[in-house]
């Protein structure tokens, strides 16, 4: 688990690199070896090994094989899984998407980099419409209310970054989006009644897409497992890739990067989804709220 903005080397995202490095670190410590032993096996320096274990540099296949042999992890399943993880990480580091050139992507850049190569996103929201579903007016109203900008011109630039993400819902490889939203997010008048009316109309339209599943957790559901806050579960097409959980707070970002954590969040998401309205009934509720405005 990593809090705040992660350290970055030459990568677009170090999430997968940190996961790979942490596994190799665990294997080394289990064997009671020091970084100097790993450096000797790789004919490398100790600082380089430290960077590898912290996910700051891409890892070559020969280095992974050598370390697995040193740590006594020669079974083909383990080696293949780590090699696949390293390949995914190298591909992510080479990616130079539009966010890479946007000065206003900010802390969102690493998440967008993962979202761009993801196959599926499960999103739970307590008080906001999911970012991938927001209208321009809704997103602008949020940025105005945040007040983090110094110049009003920055607002439109930030809104543009957020809206460009929505291209992933279409195209040749559309992202599978499964969003569960608390009813409060639909009734909160972000930007006023007219902005919310158009926002709810867009949610209804998006719910018709074959790659979008939308459910609403109604007030009457009472207590639920995900009351503590919103999160995203990012999944990848590759079988070897473990889901990554992204939790964005007020002052920090937390990444859950191991199988146990991602499974816990997935279970909480599923329980909350079971308490929510079915997709068709969710659209009916959204339309009812829209008509009330």
Image: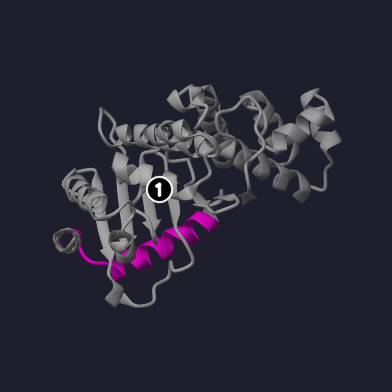
Q: Position of residue 46 (x, y in %)?
A: 83, 31
In the figure, 92 relative to 175: above or below? above
Q: Is residue 75 visible?
A: no
In this view, 241 is above or below 49: below
Read off the magenta span.
261-280
Element at label 1: helix
Give me the residue at 26% from left, 27% from top.
172
Q: Which residue is mark 1?
A: 142
In the image: residue 44, left or right of residue 145? right
Q: State the residue at coordinates (66%, 36%).
A: 55
Label 1 packing within 10 angstroms: few (<14), some (14-19), many (20+): some
Front residue (pair 4, 21):
4
* Residue 106 visible to the viewer: yes
Residue 97 appears left or right of 37: left
Which residue is nearer to you in this view: 154 or 45? 154
Give the residue drawn at x 23%, y 66%: 277
- Report x, y in % for residue 221: 30, 75
> Colour mode?
one colour
Our reading of the magenta stretch's main secondary structure is helix
| Closer to the camera in the image, 96 or 186 | 186
Quadrant location of the C terminus in the rendered image: bottom left
Is 274 one of the magenta-colored residues? Answer: yes
User: Left or right: where does residue 48 sit relative to residue 260?
Assistant: right
Between residues 140 and 64, which one lies in front from this camera angle? 140
Q: Residue at x 24, y 55 (%)?
A: 193
* Residue 123 at x, y percent in the picture: 38, 52
Q: Quadrant of residue 16?
A: top right
Position in image of residue 150 (x %, y %): 54, 37
Residue 101 on the magenta segment: no
């Amino acid at each position: 688990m990593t809090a705040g903005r992660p350290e970055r080397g030459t990568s677009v995202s170090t999430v997968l690199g940190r996961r790979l490095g942490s596994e190799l670190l665990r294997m080394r410590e289990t064997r009671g070896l020091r970084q100097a032993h790993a450096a000797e096996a790789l004919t490398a320096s100790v600082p380089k090994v430290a960077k590898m274990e912290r996910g700051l540099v891409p890892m070559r296949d020969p280095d992974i094989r050598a370390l697995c042999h040193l740590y006594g992890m020669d079974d083909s399943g383990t080696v293949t899984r780590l090699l696949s993880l390293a390949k995914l990480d190298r591909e992510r580091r080479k990616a130079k998407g539009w966010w890479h050139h946007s000065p206003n992507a900010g802390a969102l850049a690493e998440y967008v980099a993962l979202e761009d190569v993801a196959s599926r996103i499960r999103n739970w929201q307590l008080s906001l419409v999911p970012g991938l579903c927001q209208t321009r007016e809704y997103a602008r109203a949020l940025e105005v209310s945040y007040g983090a900008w110094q110049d009003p011109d920055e607002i439109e630039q930030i809104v543009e970054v957020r809206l460009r993400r929505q291209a992933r819902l279409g195209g040749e490889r559309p992202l599978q989006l499964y969003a569960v939203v608390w009813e409060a997010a639909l009734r909160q008048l972000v930007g006023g009644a007219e902005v919310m009316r158009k926002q709810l109309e867009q949610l209804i339209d998006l719910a018709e897409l074959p790659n979008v599943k939308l459910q609403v957790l109604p007030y009457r559901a009472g207590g639920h497992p995900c009351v503590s806050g919103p999160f995203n579960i990012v999944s990848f097409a590759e079988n070897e890739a473990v889901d990554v959980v992204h939790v964005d707070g007020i002052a920090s970002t937390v990444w859950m990067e191991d199988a146990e954590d991602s499974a816990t969040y997935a279970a909480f998401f599923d329980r909350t989804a079971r308490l929510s309205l079915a997709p068709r009934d969710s659209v009916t509720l959204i339309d009812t709220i829209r008509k009330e405005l």
